[in-house]
Image (cartoon, grey):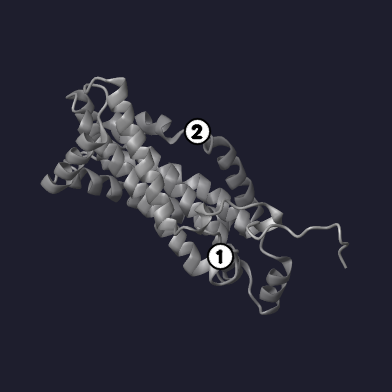
């Protein structure tokens, strides 16, 4: 029984007795983030007005909003965005498939484990854009070169995450699978892959972030991907013509897609690993 000198934590204390940021934390998530967004836009506009920056190097939020609406309404941003997303999706598909195959081989055989460890140590620290010149020589000046560098960017972080998931499967779960007669690839398919789902989702989330940055950077260097340039090419062209609102409109498009995909991955995580009790749900 606690002594009379002990005091209970305050009613607004969070986990571990720490005081939560009431009343901010009691506001709905959407309202909190909307307030932050409006505040950031206000700081942006205040800087443009107070600093008197040249419109040739910086644009205010109203000019960017107008360029953004015109770009999407007139279609100037639609084609580049779809091109970039198509390249990213194809690169992620290839990179994910290779990551699963390499990781499964690493779990099944000692040779595969040594191969994956060596390749990850050599290639993972290498910026994917650094191999773009070679990809252009190997595959030519088309989308194949961009898909190659995106797949390379996605492959290694996904392999690391999936490999971690495979290696942290509880020994009891593996013993149950083996007692049911599961061996080799069936054990990987029916035990390792489901048990490694939280790490797999985290790997996809990390892989898309690496792939997204890589495809934009590659397009800035590469230029036109086939008949239609992507978002990176759109931004570079706007910069070349000193159309700064369009540059910011392209950047805003990238940011909004990033937010949308992050929300999609959060929803996927909640509908799978959190709902199935494989991970504690994080508060939004």
Residue closest to the far bottom? 180
Q: Position of residue 196 (x, y in %)?
A: 58, 62
Residue under the point 30% across and 29% down = 221
Using the numbered discs, state the Cα–Cα distance from disc 2 to disc 1 in whole angstroms: 28 Å
Residue at screen point 13% across, 46% down: 75
Question: Do residues under tags 2 and 1 come within 8 Å of each other at their CB atoms?
Answer: no
Task: Say which residue appears at 14% left-offset and 42% top-offset.
Answer: 70
Looking at the image, residue 266 lies above or below residue 147: below
* Farthest residue, direction front: 4
User: Quarter of the image containing the N terminus?
Assistant: bottom right
Side of 208 where 277 appears, left or right? right
Please tell me which residue lies in front, 269 or 3: 3
Instruction: Residue 95 in the image: state x and y as whole percent.
Output: 43, 50
State which tag comes first along the sequence, 2 or 1: 2
Picture residue at 67% right of the left edge, 79% below the top: 180
For residue 247, above or below residue 28? above
Q: Residues within 10 Å of mark 2 (few under 14, many from 20)?
A: few
**What is the x, y in percent for residue 225?**
23, 38
Q: Is residue 148 visible?
A: no
In the picture, the disc for residue 126 is: 2
Quarter of image, res 65: top left
- Residue picked out by circle 1: 193
**Res. 173 in view:** yes
Total label count? Answer: 2
Label 1 SS:
helix
Q: Nearer the viewer, residue 270 or 49?
A: 49
> Closest to the observer: 93 or 180?
93
**Where is residue 6, by image quadrant?**
bottom right
In the picture, measured across the screen, residue 190 lies left or right of residue 70, that is: right
Residue 45, given in percent of the width and then of the height, sits at: 30, 32
Residue 53 is labelled as none
């Amino acid at each position: 029984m606690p002594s009379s000198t002990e005091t209970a934590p305050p009613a607004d204390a969070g986990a571990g007795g720490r005081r939560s940021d009431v009343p901010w934390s009691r506001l709905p998530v959407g309202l909190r983030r909307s307030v932050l967004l409006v505040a950031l836009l206000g700081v942006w506009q205040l800087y443009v007005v107070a600093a008197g920056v040249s419109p040739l190097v910086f644009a205010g939020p109203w000019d960017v909003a107008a360029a953004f609406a015109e770009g999407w309404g007139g279609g100037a941003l639609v084609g580049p965005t779809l091109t970039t997303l198509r390249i990213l999706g194809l690169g992620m598909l290839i990179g994910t498939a290779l990551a699963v195959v390499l990781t499964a081989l690493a779990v099944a055989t000692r040779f595969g484990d040594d191969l994956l460890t060596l390749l990850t140590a050599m290639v993972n620290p290498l910026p994917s854009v650094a191999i773009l010149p070679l990809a252009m020589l190997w595959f030519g000046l088309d989308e194949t070169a961009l898909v190659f560098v995106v797949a390379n960017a996605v492959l290694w972080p996904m392999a690391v995450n999936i490999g971690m998931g495979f290696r942290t499967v509880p020994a009891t779960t593996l013993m149950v699978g083996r007692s049911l007669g599961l061996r080799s690839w069936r054990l990987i398919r029916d035990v390792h892959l489901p048990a490694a789902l939280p790490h797999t989702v985290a790997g996809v989330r990390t892989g898309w972030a690496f792939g997204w940055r890589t495809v934009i950077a590659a397009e800035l260097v590469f230029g036109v991907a086939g008949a239609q340039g992507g978002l990176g090419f759109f931004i570079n062209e706007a910069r070349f013509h000193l159309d700064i609102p369009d540059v910011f409109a392209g950047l805003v498009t990238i940011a909004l897609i990033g937010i949308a995909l992050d929300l999609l991955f959060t929803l996927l995580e909640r509908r799978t690993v959190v709902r199935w009790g494989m991970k504690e749900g994080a508060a939004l």
